[in-house]
Amino acid sequence: MEGNKKPLGDDSGPVDNQVTRMVRNLRKRLHLRGHRVHHHFIRGASYSLGSGAVSLIILWTQSRF
C-alpha cells in the first residue's frame, strides 16, 4: 500500500487538476474584467465627448441661421 502513495507536490490527481484549472480560469476572468472596465469607461467617455461635440455644432448652426 505504501507504493501507491503520491509524493507531496504531485498535482496529477483529478481533483488537483480541476482546482488548478479553476484557479487559472478565475485569475484570467479577473484580469479580463479589469480590462473590460477600462474599455467601457473609455467608450463611454468617447460617446459623451462625441455627443457633446454634435450638440455644440447643432447649437452653433441654429444660432447662425
Image (cartoon, grey):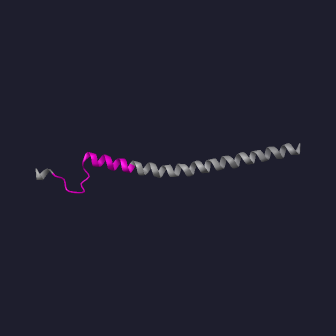
Q: Residue at x 41, y 49 (%)?
A: 26
- The answer to whether residue 48 is left or right of residue 9 is right
Q: Position of residue 44 (x, y in %)?
A: 63, 47
Magenta residues, start to end: 5-24
Q: Position of residue 43 (x, y in %)?
A: 61, 48
**Camera-nearest residue between 34 and 65:** 34
- The answer to whether residue 33 is left or right of residue 49 is left
Q: Position of residue 63 (x, y in %)?
A: 87, 45
Q: Position of residue 59 (x, y in %)?
A: 82, 45
Residue 31 highlighted magenta (yes or no): no
Count of all numbered marks drawn on residues in the image: 0
Quadrant of the image for the C terminus? top right
- The answer to whether residue 1 is left or right of residue 17 is left
Q: Quadrant of residue 61?
A: top right
Q: Residue at x 26, y 52 (%)?
A: 11
Residue found at the very far bottom of the displayed protein:
8
Residue found at the very far left of the displayed protein:
1
- The answer to whether residue 17 is left or right of residue 57 is left
Q: Residue at x 73, y 47 (%)?
A: 52
Residue 11 highlighted magenta (yes or no): yes
Q: Residue at x 53, y 48 (%)?
A: 36
